[in-house]
Image: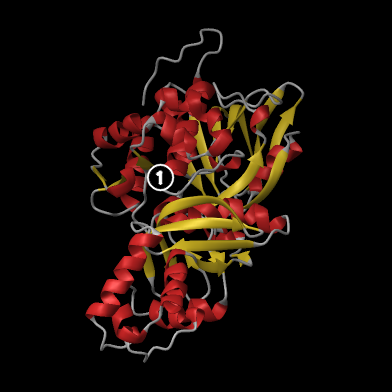
Amino acid sequence: MKTWDVIVVGGGAAGLMAGGQAAACGADVLILEKMKRPARKLCITGKGRCNLTNNAELRDFIGHFGPRGRFLHQAFNRFFSAELISFFNDKGLQLTHERGGRVFPVDGKAVAILETFEKWLNQMGVRLDCGVRVDKILADTSGVKGVRGSGQVYHCKKLILTTGGSSYPRTGSTGDGYRFAGQLGHTITPIRPALVPLLTDLGLCRDLAGLELRNIDVGLLVDGKKKGKWFGEIAFFENRLAGPVVLTLSGQVVELLRDGRQVELALDLKPALDEKKLDARLLRDFQKRHRETLESVLGGLLPAKLIPVCLKETELNADQQAGTIRSKQRRRLRLWLKDFKIPIPGHRPMAEAIVTAGGVDLSEVNPKTMESKLVDGLHLAGEILDLHGDTGGYNLQAAFSTGWLAGQCAAQDHDRGDLSSSP
């Protein structure tokens, strides 16, 4: 029976890059994917547009992963955003840069990324077998030997696990890799959702469904104490809060809620104005439009959907003439505009998370090669690792970079230490 130089388990972003790069280095490569088509999650990322990477500088980029981001230095030093952009451009896929440093295919179609990969893999001679559900990693004390899947045994010299996390399970990310790695002796940091919508009062969500608030400050309150502030946008849906700021905060919020802490978001709807300037603005508006109702004047300050919420929480009368507003009433309004608190009692399930937090303990993986420190011939890349970043293209770049490095190193002759091949 044939023995492959490299078998990649999982045909997502990290797996396709790992398999193609291993083949580019001369290895005979087989990619096994349990779904009928690879990269299902990649194709729905960014509402089907796929934010591939971000053009942030290296230090800033790594900072978006928190303390664990240091693990990515080696992979990013070898294959970072500039190399990824060149990789796709060289293969005919044109990319565009948008606000926040985000990078997308110029035609706005994530499937173009998969098509580019499939063409490249075919050129590299990679065999991609879909519909193969791996159920066991074959290994002994000398290292990996192969895998068993769909009633067959596949032998290999090196194995790369790129099975993803547990988010969006309908795309094939069902946490299989955590079980495989655990069976081989790896420590699995408990998994939990990250970049996930947050729950709040259902009545509030229904009232504000469809509302997007941009250019606001969002503070995180834990047991009544502020723990940080972020600037950006949030979006209200019928049963949840989402948007870039909410997703960025969600990882911390999930942890806090698990610890039984009380969590609130505090929205500063007028971050460009301090309280003194905001008070002057309100006074000027009320005097200038003194014959209009308070509800009418608020139309110049707030989105229409937010006005009833504001009036309810400040206990102000919508029909009161603006010119009759007293200083105490104005103060209540001013404080609410600068500190609109939203309780967060929970979060949406793992199935709705963009990425998975937790995974294979990074201390058990060599960051220079992505090889397991416990099992010879086993490499790991992508979301299976205990590593996740903010929204904005950071996680996909980490998947591509760790996949590229894993493929490079799995294919290399370790005696020569030859790392000269490029994609």
Could you say which quadrant of the image residue 208 lies in? Answer: bottom left
Q: Nearer the viewer, residue 167 or 153?
A: 167
- Residue 65 lies, in percent from the top left, at 52, 39
Amino acid on which the number 1 mark rests in the picture = Gly
Q: Residue drawn at (73%, 55%), measured in percent from left and top?
A: 259
Q: Which residue is mark 1?
A: 393
Quarter of the image for the N terminus: give it. top right
Q: Is residue 86 above or below residue 13?
A: above
Q: Nearer the viewer, residue 351 or 294?
A: 294
- Residue 352 lies, in percent from the top left, at 54, 62
Could you say which quadrant of the image residue 220 lies in? Answer: bottom right
Q: Nearer the viewer, residue 26 or 174?
A: 174
Q: Nearer the viewer, residue 405 or 291?
A: 291
Could you say which quadrant of the image residue 342 lies in? Answer: bottom right
Quarter of the image for the C terminus: give it. top left
Q: Residue drawn at (40%, 27%), measured in percent from left and top?
A: 79
Q: Residue drawn at (45%, 55%), measured in percent from left and top?
A: 245
- Residue 143 lies, in percent from the top left, at 70, 24
- Residue 26 lies, in percent from the top left, at 43, 21
Q: Is residue 152 visible?
A: no
Q: Residue drawn at (64%, 32%), measured in percent from left and top?
A: 362
Q: Is residue 392 visible?
A: yes
Q: Secondary structure at mark 1?
A: loop
Residue closest to the far front:
327
